[in-house]
Image: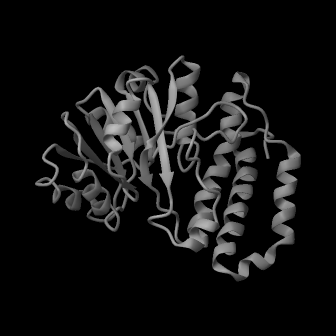
Amino acid sequence: MSVVIPARNARGTLSAQLEALASQEYDLDWEVVVVANACRDDTAKLARVWAPRLPALHVVTLQTPGVNCARNAGCHAARAEVILLCDADDVVAPGWIKAMADGLHSYDLVSGSMDPTLLNSHASQVARRPPATRSLENHHRFLPYIKGGNCGFHKKLWKALGGFDPTYQRGGDDIEFSWRAQLAGFSIGFVPAAVIHYRYRRTAFSAARQSFGYGRARPRLYRDFRLSGLPRTGIRASLTSWAWLATHPHHLLRHDSRIRWCTRLGQQAGRLIGCLQYRVLDP
């Protein structure tokens, strides 16, 4: 088992993730591969400090930015035939590795539960839509998809697909991989016992920036998968979102509702930019 962690400027959060991994109980051999991805801090140096607690620890330095570039570099370096992915700013729960390993006995590609309650304030939690805890995410009326920060797969799947698409950045990267895998005939499943404590963006600006990337990715996903059956979002849903933004400016007055408002604005603005960038009508 190889646990791959893309890490960009993760000095403030990586230690909590490595501590959680060092506390995992799993009988078979496993390793951790940290990919320091175009870092401007000492993420790589910090990761190496954990070698006594994680004897099978490897640190890869990469100058090319992008989470999928980091994932591919980690998969290349991984020595095992089963790969698990988690993020440097989250924390795996006890039993995570074993639960993922059990799930991969039945599926080629799996994803687990995201729990936002441990690492986030109540205000941050109520500002977001709660993540799925009983099934895979599926918000596009098409195929379900994994969460790239909590997933696992057989390395043969990664090789067969030619890896993660490095041109998908800041959104859609895990969805695109999931859909290509299913369309290629690989099985996908959900492992509720594989829990990761998920960290939200702290500020309205960072939340808006993240959702902008997600929104911009949606028109590209439509361009790339419409011939496989992905439907348009629909103009009515877009107009409803813009109308909500226009009629709820008072949400900017409170921290929790400000994050919700800015997240929605970022997503809608991202979709408009994505439609122009990828030359499709999917607002």
Q: Residue at x 65, y 39 (%)?
A: 138
Report which quarter residue 2 is drawn in. top left
Q: Residue furthest bottom?
A: 253
Q: Residue at x 73, y 50 (%)?
A: 271
Q: Nearer the viewer, residue 184 or 271?
A: 184
User: Which quarter of the rendered picture does the N terminus lie within?
Assistant: top left
Q: Nearer the viewer, residue 193 or 33?
A: 193
Q: Is residue 222 left or right of residue 79?
A: right
Q: Is residue 116 left or right of residue 3?
A: right
Q: Nearer the viewer, residue 133 or 187?
A: 133
Residue 117 place in picture, x, y as percent: 50, 63
Residue 260 place in picture, x, y as percent: 68, 67
Residue 124 place in picture, x, y as percent: 57, 69
Q: Is residue 195 left or right of residue 216?
A: left
Q: Residue at x 56, y 23 (%)?
A: 182
Q: How many marks?
A: 0
Q: Residue at x 26, y 35 (%)?
A: 77
Report which quarter residue 14 is drawn in. bottom left
Q: Please determine whether, in this image, residue 250 is positioned above or below residue 186.
A: below
Residue 132 place in picture, x, y as percent: 59, 47
Can see residue 203?
no
Q: Please determine whether, in this image, residue 42 is positioned above or below residue 234.
A: below
